[in-house]
């Protein structure tokens, strides 16, 4: 049973399935490593701030005062999961 099948033009589909980078030296470049590790430094704070802001918006909208704490915890957990996922990808 097919539920949601999307049909894309022929040119668009080739952009969605890009081949992996075949150059192993590019992965070891110091600038590429600097970019990856500096991205790690922003993942956790960005997830925390985004979760808190979304929770604060729901607090105002629903006239509650506990949702921002839940958003803070969920944002921190999401940022930490992304940091762990990215770090494990680099160690392989």
Image (cartoon, rainbow, N blue to C red):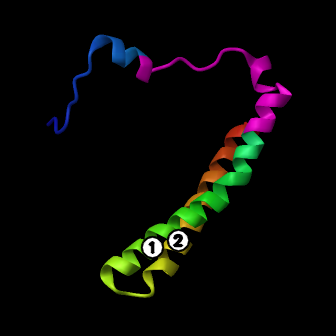
Residue located farthest toward the front when viewing the structure as drawn: 60
At label 1, counting other C-alpha atoms closer than 10 Å, the crowd grade (few under 14, some 14-19, many 20 or more) is: many
* Front position in the image: 28 or 69: 69
Report the residue at 61% width, 58% height from top.
Answer: 46
Task: Please tell me the numbered disc located at residue 55.
Answer: 1
Residue to which mark 2 is pinned: 52
Residue 6, given in percent of the width and then of the height, sits at: 22, 29
Can residue 38 be seen in the rendering of this structure?
A: yes
28 lies above or below 53:
above
Q: Magenta span covers which residues?
A: 15-35
Residue 62 location, quadrant: bottom left
Secondary structure of residue under mark 2? helix
Residue 43, given in percent of the width and then of the height, sits at: 65, 53
Report the residue at 81% width, 29% height from top.
Answer: 31
Residue 24, given in percent of the width and then of the height, sits at: 75, 19
Residue 23, given in percent of the width and then of the height, sits at: 72, 15
28 lies above or below 82:
above
């Amino acid at each position: 049973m097919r539920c949601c099948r999307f049909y894309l033009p022929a040119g668009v589909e080739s952009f969605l399935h890009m081949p992996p980078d075949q150059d192993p030296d590019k992965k070891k470049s110091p600038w590429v490593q600097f970019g990856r590790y500096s991205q790690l430094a922003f993942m956790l704070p960005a997830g925390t701030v985004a979760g808190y802001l979304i929770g604060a918006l729901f607090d105002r909208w629903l006239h509650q005062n506990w949702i921002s704490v839940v958003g803070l915890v969920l944002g921190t957990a999401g940022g930490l999961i992304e940091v762990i996922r990215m770090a494990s990808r680099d160690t392989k």
